[in-house]
């Protein structure tokens, strides 16, 4: 007992309100599916896709691309990807799901969409248009719809293809140069943090006219934007991965002409780029930091696709983000404050057969999740394939609903009622803040991390929220929240962690 008392006193001196419970969701990854869903297999047993893209056709069939990603620095000229069409994808019995191979002539296919009944697919060098010419319900004709960007490094991927207001959107990743490649490609000059020279448009978001296929550059300074989606108000949101010039992963709100931090290396020359390559688009502009930072190896490691939650689903209007290396889903709440997008990330779900890469809402109201993995560190727990569906159960969990910025602090809303005494207990809130600094290094540490003590907590009349007064908030800082109350009906929190990125106060 004396040891327990000493430990409690020490925690109090260090400013830690409560000792951490050793359970998933409380500083540790979740282990199970969210209670709002059951997870079901959505593939026959002998179909093991490494999912690059998902898209539902008007008749309910599911288009799936698959390819084996290789984290070895070797540029591949040969096709490595396959397009499949799945019949009966909503069947609960995997044995009743049928898979038809459509084409093997794809190269790293990482995006698809269906618009006006037509399937569009992006692989490394183009966006292609696929039509059904014989009326059998399966696409058989491929035409180039949009192209023009250069992909001449193994890490030059093309991601997409959300559609909004007459346009498709896709993102292009940047070069990675391993030490062995420096000799192979006759590279001269500095290569910091694997950041080699690039051709034009790399690290950009492209906007493609759905009628003409012509594209324009929207933003620059991305690194590995393995995911792009349409969020609130039609805003395009882009998850990007940590790396050179990226101290942590983050979710960026696309605004024309913005620069998001990744400076393409123009100092090094090679046989490919004798003039040092092309600078990142809009790199003459100041860096715009993410709408939502994703602290590395705490909240995320390798973000994938982001998708909006539709009406009728829990947390409708918020977004879900796939996570490849740490696995599972993160839930993202964003708000626009004085013209600036900002918001919070929450742990949401785990319990899948692989790290998640792609997401698609099905005609049955289920969320279809595609898994992918490779060798090295491009996987979750060594898993490399998966295709599952998340079926709504009608259940809920006790958790954060959202966190919003207020004039003097933050409003934290929960999914269930909490007793007023718990909400207003200042010692029940462990809050920390920090920022990041962009450097040419691969990733970066937290800068200026410090504990934050709220000075006041006022519970909402309905017991569902609390307003915390937090003095001296700083722009472009991450505010980490941890609290662990019991709901009025006795439940513990599904996940006690939350990360809010603060830019402006209302």
Image: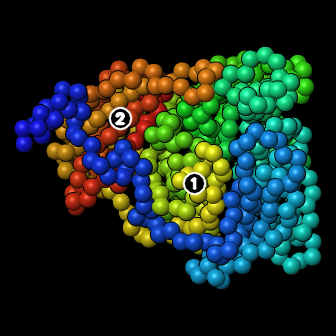
Q: Residue at horizontal 42%, vertical 49%? A: 29
**Circle 1 — which element?**
loop
Q: Nearer the viewer, residue 61 or 473?
A: 61
Q: Residue at horizontal 56%, vertical 36%? A: 250
- Residue that lies at the very extreme toward the left in this rendered image: 2
What percent of the width, then of the height, locates residue 137? 83, 76
Disc on res. 9: none
Q: Which residue is mark 1?
A: 382
**Circle 2 — which element?**
strand
Q: Is residue 241 left or right of residue 269?
A: left
> Which of the 4 quarters of the picture holds residue 358?
bottom right
What percent of the width, then of the height, locates residue 9? 13, 31
What percent of the width, then of the height, locates residue 278? 83, 24
Q: CA distance from mark 1 to mark 2?
A: 39 Å
Q: Is residue 5 left or right of residue 370?
A: left
Q: Nearer the viewer, residue 340 or 44?
A: 44
Q: Residue at horizontal 49%, vertical 39%? A: 297
Q: Is residue 320 visible?
A: no
Q: Residues within 10 Å of mark 2 (few under 14, many from 20)?
A: many
Which of the image's four quarters has the N terminus? top left
What's the image's color scheme? Answer: rainbow
> Which of the 4 quarters of the picture holds residue 382?
bottom right
Q: Which residue is mark 2?
A: 410
């Amino acid at each position: 007992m004396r040891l327990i008392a000493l430990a409690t006193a020490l925690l109090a001196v260090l400013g830690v309100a409560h000792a951490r419970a050793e359970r998933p969701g409380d500083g540790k990854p979740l282990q199970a599916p969210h209670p709002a869903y059951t997870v079901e297999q959505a593939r026959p047993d002998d179909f093991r896709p490494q999912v690059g893209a998902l898209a539902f056709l008007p008749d309910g069939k599911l288009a799936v691309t698959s390819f084996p990603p290789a984290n070895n620095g070797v540029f591949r000229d040969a096709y490595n990807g396959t397009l499949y069409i799945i019949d009966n994808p909503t069947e609960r019995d995997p044995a009743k799901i049928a898979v038809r191979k459509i084409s093997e002539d794809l190269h790293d296919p990482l995006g698809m969409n269906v618009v006006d009944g037509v399937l569009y697919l992006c692989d490394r060098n183009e966006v292609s248009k696929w039509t059904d010419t014989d009326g059998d319900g399966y696409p058989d004709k491929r035409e180039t719809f949009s192209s023009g960007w250069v992909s001449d490094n193994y890490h030059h991927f093309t991601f997409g293809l959300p559609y909004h207001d007459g346009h498709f959107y896709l993102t292009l990743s940047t070069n990675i140069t391993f030490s062995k490649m420096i000799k192979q490609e006759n590279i001269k000059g500095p290569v910091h943090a694997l950041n080699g020279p690039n051709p034009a448009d790399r690290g950009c978001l492209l906007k493609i006219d759905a009628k003409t296929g012509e594209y324009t550059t929207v933003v620059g300074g991305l690194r590995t934007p393995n995911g792009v989606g349409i969020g609130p108000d039609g805003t395009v949101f882009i998850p990007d991965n940590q790396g050179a010039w990226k101290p942590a992963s983050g979710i960026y709100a696309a605004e024309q002409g913005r620069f998001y931090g990744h400076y393409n290396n123009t100092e090094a020359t090679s046989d490919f780029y004798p003039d040092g390559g092309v600078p990142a688009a809009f790199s003459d502009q100041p860096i715009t930091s993410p709408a939502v930072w994703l602290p590395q190896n705490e909240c995320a490691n390798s973000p994938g696709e982001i998708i909006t939650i539709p009406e009728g689903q829990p947390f409708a209007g918020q977004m879900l983000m796939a996570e490849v290396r740490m696995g599972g889903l993160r839930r993202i709440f964003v708000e626009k404050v004085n013209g600036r997008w900002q918001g919070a990330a929450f742990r949401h779900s785990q319990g899948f057969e692989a790290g998640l890469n792609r997401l698609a809402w099905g005609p049955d109201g289920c969320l279809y999740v595609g898994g992918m993995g490779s060798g090295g560190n491009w996987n979750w727990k060594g898993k490399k394939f998966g295709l599952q569906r998340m079926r709504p159960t009608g259940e809920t969990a006790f958790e954060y609903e959202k966190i919003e910025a207020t004039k003097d602090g933050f409003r934290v809303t929960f999914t269930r009622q909490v007793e007023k005494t718990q909400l207003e207990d200042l010692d029940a809130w462990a809050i920390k803040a920090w920022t990041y600094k962009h450097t040419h290094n691969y990733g970066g540490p937290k800068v200026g991390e410090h504990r934050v003590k709220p000075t006041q907590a006022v519970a909402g009349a309905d017991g569902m929220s609390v307003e915390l007064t937090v003095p001296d908030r700083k722009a472009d800082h991450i505010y980490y929240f941890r609290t662990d109350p019991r709901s009025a009906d006795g439940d513990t929190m599904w996940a006690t962690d939350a990360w809010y990125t603060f830019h402006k106060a209302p």
